Image: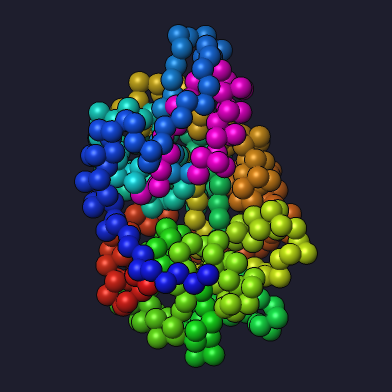
Amino acid sequence: MRNSKTMKLSRGLSTLAAAAIVLSACAGSSSPSTSDVSSSQSTVGDNTSEEIILTIYSGRNEKLIAPLLEKFTEQTGIQVAARYGDSGEMAALLLTEGGASPADVFFSQDAGALGAVQGAGLFDVLPSDVTELVTPAFRSADDMWVGTSGRVRVVIYNPSLVDTPPSGIDDLLDPKWSGKIGFAPTNASWQSFVTALRVVRGEYGAQVWLEGFAKNKPVAYEKNGVVRDAVNAGEVSLGLVNHYYLYEKIAAEGQAAVVARNHFFENGDVGGLVNVSGVGVLASTKNRDAALTFVKFLLSGDAQTYFATKTFEYPIVAGISPPDGLPSLQQLNPLSIDLSNLKSIEQTQQLLEKVGLLTR
């Protein structure tokens, strides 16, 4: 169903910080949530220590990530306490708490949130035996965080309505797509794309594109999954989402129930942005060894295979194949961009409001 209510979004990490003060004071609040994954004697490397509780602030979905955290505990014996929430919300909480944060690790859904925490000087430098596992494109240039899995922005389309999908984002401005493109204006991945657009084309260039996009009357939905379903049902012809939404629907309903297809932008088109989930260790942690053990675990073959087979994301460590049917990142030749620069979400929201695309 088309979203008929005005959807409101916070004004970025600086505004979220005020709310984070309340959240940090209310340990019993339901959002973000806290869950103890397990409790046992902890072993870090070869040294048995007193019981360790590794506190992870997670911007990743609990349903998807909790099984992975359980696997980490099974393999290492390290107890985990995870606090879940939106990545921007978690980043704002860290900015508010500063060096007094109880968090040992920030596991983010989005590189922009990692960049914000890095910019505040809250991360510790990761050792080279960790950072060298990940290609430079998917880690902090200063080795403050590393990506753990990748996702690609795509155009999802209904082949019964679309013969030839657009080859790049500028093709989306063609009047023939007027009223036929679905998007999720309050979704973090859409706003990360617009932030990348600002980085690549500058403020004026991004505004020109967004004004052209707005002129084409795109149809706003609440979430990416709703965009996907609208395309699959033929309600709109195209949708702007992340690649894995299609695979989630196929896994849930079977290939026969899914008409929609993904179209990947190639050769550096900003519409094909590859963003990452990633992880950083807080400089204030008292459990650095355990925190680094967790980071290494996320880059292990077991965890990378989990991302490929359970969350349908791209592994970003060499030697692990992407989900079946996906082109390799090398084939896509994606946009080269410092993902830490995606932290300026507040400016992106201001621009989206200016062109009339923030609330629908």
Going 58% across and 66% down the picture, which residue do you hit?
A: 228
Is residue 173 a member of the stretch shown in magenta? no
Between 193 and 246, the residue placed more toward the observer is: 246
Q: Quadrant of residue 12?
A: bottom left
User: What percent of the width, then of the height, locates residue 288?
Assistant: 41, 23
Q: Is residue 213 above or below residue 89?
A: below
Quadrant occupied by the C terminus = bottom left
Looking at this rendering, what residue extends furthest in the bottom direction?
Answer: 175
In front here: 29 or 350? 29
Please report the bounds of the magenta region as a residue range.
Answer: 61-88
Where 225 falls versus 214 (above or below)? Answer: above
Please provide percent x and percent y for residue 99: 25, 30
Return the residue nearer the eye: 222 or 199: 222
**What's the residue at 71%, 66% (across, down)?**
258
Colour convention of the picture: rainbow
Query: Residue drawn at (61%, 51%), measured in percent from left and top?
Result: 313
Please say whether residue 81 is one of the residues in the magenta stretch: yes
Main SS, magenta region, reads: helix
The residue positioned 50% from the left and 44% from the top of the image is: 61
* Position of residue 5 measured from the top left corner of the image (x, y, whole percent): 38, 69
The answer to whether any part of residue 37 appears in the image is yes
